[in-house]
Image (spheres, rainbow, N blue to C red):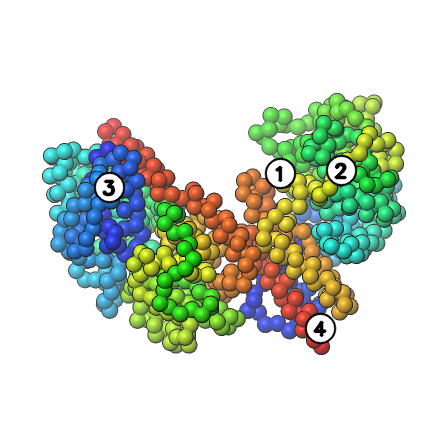
Amino acid sequence: MRLAMLGWEFPPFISGGLGVHCYELTRRLAERGHQIDFFMPVSGKNVTSPHPSIRLIEVSPTVLSPYLTFTKKGKLANYGEGLLKAVEVYNALAAKMVAEENAKNPYSLVHAHDWLTAPGAQAAARLSRLPHVQTFHSTEFDRTSTPWDAIVRIERQAASDADLLIAVSKRTQDQLVSHLGANTGKIRVVYNGVDAGRYVSNGKPAMAIQTDGKPIVLFLGRLTEQKGPVQFLHAAKKVLEKRPDTLFFIAGTGELMPLLINLSIELGLTEHVRFLGFLPDDDQRRIYSIANVYVMPSTSEPFGITALEAMASGTPIIISKTSGVGEVVKSALKVDFWDIQGMAGKILAVLQYSSLRNSMTGMAPEDLRKLTWEKCAQETEAVYSEAVQKHHK
Amino acid sequence: MRLAPFSVFAPDGADGGELFTRYFNHELNRQILQKVATKCYLPTNRLLLELLEKHPELKISFSTTGVFLEQARLYMPEVVDSFAALARTGRVEFLSETYYHSLSSLFTEQTEFEEQVKLHQAAIAPFCQKPSVFRNTEAMFSNDIAYWAECMGYKGIMAEGLDQMLGWRSPTYTYSVKNCSKIRALLRHYKLSDDIGYRFSQKSWNEWPLTAPKYARWLADTPGDCTNLFMDYETFGEHHWEDTGIFNFLRALPGEILKHPHLEFATPSEIAADVVPKGEVEAPSVISWADNERDTSAWLGNDMQRAAFSELTSLEKPIKELNDPDLLRTWRHLQNSDHLYYCCTKSLSDQDVHNYFSPYESPFESFINYMNVLQDLKAHVKKRQKK
C-alpha cells in the first residue's frame, strides 16, 4: 500500500511514546513492502528516514513539543498557548500537501496519530476521498484531570469521522467509547511493542552519577499529573522509613518539575532523590539497566511503552493498575496509583527478595515475545485492509 | 487458611497468640468455610447418610485435615457432627494425613512430619480407630515416604496412579513398593476420578451429560481388582453446583453400581488387607497429583517458592526451642501448602488452575505477602531468643 501518515514527532525529535511508535511502525511497515509518506511539523533537528520506502515530509515551520512545554497559566499549562493555533496551521497545510501528493500518485489511505494530526487527516480524506484510520495513543481524559474542551471536540470529531479507530489498549478503547462517544464496532485494539534486542542489559553503565552500590528506584516519564510523579515521591518517603539507603531517580521533564523539586525538599528527600532531566536514548537505556526496579505510577496510562523497555532491560517493573500495558504483561507487579503504602511495600519487596526479582525478570521474555513491533505492524496492516474494504463498499 | 494482607508498615510488638490473629484472615476463613459447608459439606453428608442407610453394601472414606476439623468446630459445629454421624455407621473410614496440609514430608528431618501425623490421628480419633491407610498431602509419594509409612505401622498408602510410574500397568491393582516389605500402594484412578471431579459439568466434553448408569457401566467394564476413586469433596455442590445435577448423580450412583453383580464397595484398609499385589511400583523422587508434572513443582517450582520454603523450614529449630505452643501453632498454619501453591508461575494451562484457586492478583503478590509474614515471624523469633 501507499500510505499517507500524519505524525507529530520522529526520532531524534521525540517527547514520548508517540514518536517511538511512529518510528517503529513505519519502519516495520516499510519492511513489509509498504510505501509511507510521513508528514510532520518542521523539527529543526536532523531527522532522517530509516528506510528508503519512508519519505519524511516536514510541513509547517512550528517547533512545538506539545506534551512538554510548560507555562504557569492554568489550563494551558500542558500545552503552551500557541499550540492550538500551531496545530490548526499544521493540519491545514498537511491536508493540502497530502491532497497534492495524492493527485500525483494516489494513496491507499490516510493514517493519523492522536488529536494533533486528526483534523488534517480528516480534511485530506475528504478532499481526496481516501479512507481515514485514526490511532489514539491517549485521550485528553488520560492526559489531564481538567480536560480542555477544544481538544475534546477535536478528539470527538475524529472518533466519529474516521473509518476505523486504533486504540493502544482495551483501556483506551473504553475511554473512546465512554468519553468520546466512539462506536465500539469500529475500534480495533493494537498493542505497542518493544525492540527487546536494543535493551539487553549491558552491565557496565557509563554514568557520572555515584550510587555507591545503593539500590535505585527509577521513574521515567514526562513530569505531568498523568504520570504520577507526586505519588512516586510520597512512596519514596515510605520506602526510606524501612530502607534509608535507597536512591530514587526521576528521569524526564515537564510542567511539574518545580513542584516536584519543592515537594522533595518538603518531604526531606533531597539526599535520596535525583532529578535527571530528559535523557537521550542512550542514557535512557543505561538508566533502565542500572535501576533495581522501575515504577510507573501513572494515574491514567493508555499503554506505557517505558514499562516494556524496562522489562527488556532486565529490570523488574511495578505499574499502576490504570495502565494499558498491564492488560498484556504478567511479569509485573500492579498497584493502585493512589495506594502509596502498597506501592512502597512492593518496592521494598523487590529490593529485598532476590527470588522475587529473579522470578519476575525470568518471566519477562515470555511477555516480551508477544509484544513486538512486527506484531503491531501486522495488526495495523490488517486494520488498513479492513478500512480500505469498508471505504469502497 | 487464608493469610491476611500483611503490611510491613504496621506496628509490631505482638506476642505469639497475637501473631496468629494478625497473620490470618479469620473472618474470611469463617465465611469461606460457612459458604462451602452450606453448599457442599452439609448437603453431601446428609445425602451420603441416606445412601448408607439405604444400601448396606455402601462404603465411603474421607481424607480431611486437622485444620479443617478445627475450623469447622469453631465456625460451624454441625459440620463436625455430620461427619461423626457418618462415622457411626461403621462403614465410613478416615485416612491418615498431616494435620496442617503441609509439605513436612519434604523437610530434611522427619520429626515435624511425624508430629503432624500424630496430631492428625488425635484429631480424627473421635471418628475412627487408629487409621491404617496413609494419604500424604496432595498425594505426595515416594519410596522413602512409603517406607516411613510402613515403619509407622500403616498397611496402605495412597498415591496417584501415574502413567510414568506404572508404565503399561493399570492402577486397578495393588502394588508393593520398592525398598518396602509389607505396605501396599493404592493408586488413584485419575481418569475415572476426574470424569466426576473435573469433567462432570463440562458441556464441551463428548460424554456430557454423565449419568449414573453410564458411569456405573464404565466401572463395570474396567478390568482389575480395585478402582480407587478419589476427588475433592467440593466436587459435590462447589466445583459443580447443584444445578449441574451432581447431587442427583451421586444419589443414583450406589444403586446403579450395585446392579453389576461383580462390583462391590470396599474401604482403603480392606483393599490394603485383602487385595493381593500384582507387582512393585517405584518412585525414587516425589510424585503427587498436582499439575501436569505430577511432582512437587506446583509448590517448589520457582525461586520464590524455594526461598519461602527455605525460610519456613529454617524456623523449625528456633521455634521449637522457644517452647511456646501458640508460636508453634502459628508457624504450622503457615506450612499449609496453599501458601506456596499461590506463588506458582507456571505458564500454560496449569496457571489457570492455580489462578482459579488463588486469592491473589498474581503469584508475585502472593509471594510478597507470604514472605513478609515469614520475615515478620523470623524477626519475632529472633527478638524472643534474645530475651
Position of residue A164 relative to residue A256, above or below, is: above
- How far from the left and from the top, in percent, is residue A285? 36, 56
Q: Identify the secondary structure beneath mark 3.
A: loop
Which structural element holds mark 4? Answer: helix
From mark 4 to mark 1, how far is it between C-alphas? 43 Å
Q: Which residue is mark 3?
A: A51
The answer to whether the residue labelled 3 contacts the one labelled 2, judged by CB atoms less than 8 Å apart, is: no
> On the same chain: label 1 and label 3?
no
The residue depicted at 69 percent of the width and 61 percent of the height is: B314
Local crowd at mark 2 within 10 Å, few (<14), some, or many (≥20)?
A: some
- Tell me the kind of residue under disc 3: His
Q: In the picture provided, is A262 more to the left or to the right than A35?
A: right
* Gap between marks 4 and 3 measured at Cα: 69 Å
The number of discs equals 4
From the image, tell me which residue sits under label 4.
B385
Left or right: residue A113 compared with residue A174: left
Q: Nearer the viewer, mark 4 or mark 3?
A: 3
Q: Residue at x 51, y 50 (%)?
A: A362
Q: Are marks 2 and 4 on the same chain?
A: yes
Q: CA distance from mark 1 to mark 3?
A: 48 Å
- For the residues labelled 2 and 1, say whether their Cβ atoms are less than 8 Å apart: no
**Is the residue at mark 2 from the same chain as the one at mark 1?**
yes
